[in-house]
Image (cartoon, helix red, strand yellow):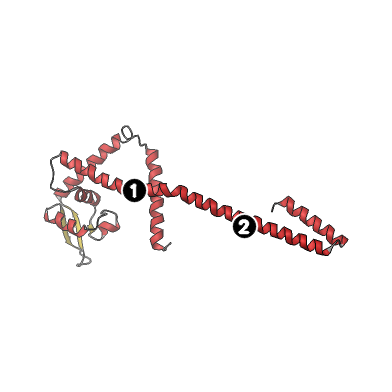
Amino acid sequence: MNFKFTLEFKLIFIRLAYLLFHKTRTSNKRASIEQGYGDMKNANVARSVDTSTEAAQAVRPLYLESLALVERLHRRLLDVIKDEFDRRGRADVNSVQALLLYNIGDNDVTASELRTRGYYLGSNVSYNVKKLVELGYLSHQRSRVDRRSVRIRLAPKGEEVHAIVAALYDKHIRTVEQIGGITAKDFDTLNQALMRLDRFWTDQIRYRL
């Protein structure tokens, strides 16, 4: 109900009350107007629901496509790393292990921290850590603070793998705009959207939304 309509309604009501003109008619008219206002309100609510439904339908295909792309990009990254090691004639580590070694870098971490810090995304982290230790890519020792905790870091062989992946990323950085057509602004927009999506998923778990 807009301001002009409200003012006119008040003026009519006051005039009718002052003249004592057909009390019953006045009462019925007021009821009719209130009913009309209620219908307008319900119509607005219905339009709001329809708009929300339309927005959800518009987001649905884009959201599902983004989920598929995120999963596909991770697999593709592993393929790219594998291809780089294949070109170098190296089959001593797989792409998952190479990415793990790169993510550890200069850090000194526990096995459990590999997941919490996002260094490793798979489910068999214990197997890969054990394997890399046996092959001499990781060194490990008991923590001085907590003897139950084992801290791991890169051994010289692990540092070599780290350097290979780092060189691969450097090559991508130099060519991604010229060949891939992806600018720094594109990456900034993409990263912001991905961080918001990450927070959204985190809140779904934390607050059980």
Residue picked out by circle 2? 42
Q: In front: mark 1 or mark 2?
A: 2
Spatial distance from mark 1 to mark 2, Cα to Cα?
39 Å
Number of callouts? 2
Few, some or many C-alpha atoms within 10 Å of disc 2 (few <14, some 14-19, many ≥20)?
Answer: few
Give the side of residue 202 with respect to residue 37, left or right: left
Foreground of the two, 49 or 129: 49
Give the residue type at disc 2: Asn
| Numbered badge on residue 68 | 1
Residue 114: image x %, image y %? 25, 57
| The N terminus lies in quadrant | bottom right
Residue 47: image x %, image y %? 58, 52
| The C terminus lies in quadrant | bottom left
Residue 187: image x %, image y %? 37, 41
Give the residue type at disc 1: Ala
The kind of secondary structure element at disc 1 is helix
Q: Tell me which residue sits at (62%, 57%) in the image.
A: 42
Determine which quarter of the picture holds residue 132: bottom left
Give the side of residue 96 with respect to residue 16, left or right: left
Q: Is residue 137 above or below residue 149?
A: above
Q: Tell me which residue sits at (52%, 52%) in the image.
A: 52
Extreme-top residue of the structure: 178
The kind of secondary structure element at disc 2 is helix
Give the side of residue 178 with respect to residue 101, left or right: right
Sequence-first disc among 1 and 2: 2
Few, some or many C-alpha atoms within 10 Å of disc 1 (few <14, some 14-19, many ≥20)?
Answer: few
Foreground of the two, 119 or 80: 80
| Numbered badge on residue 45 | none
Foreground of the two, 145 or 193: 193
Extreme-right residue of the structure: 19
Determine which quarter of the picture holds residue 130: bottom left
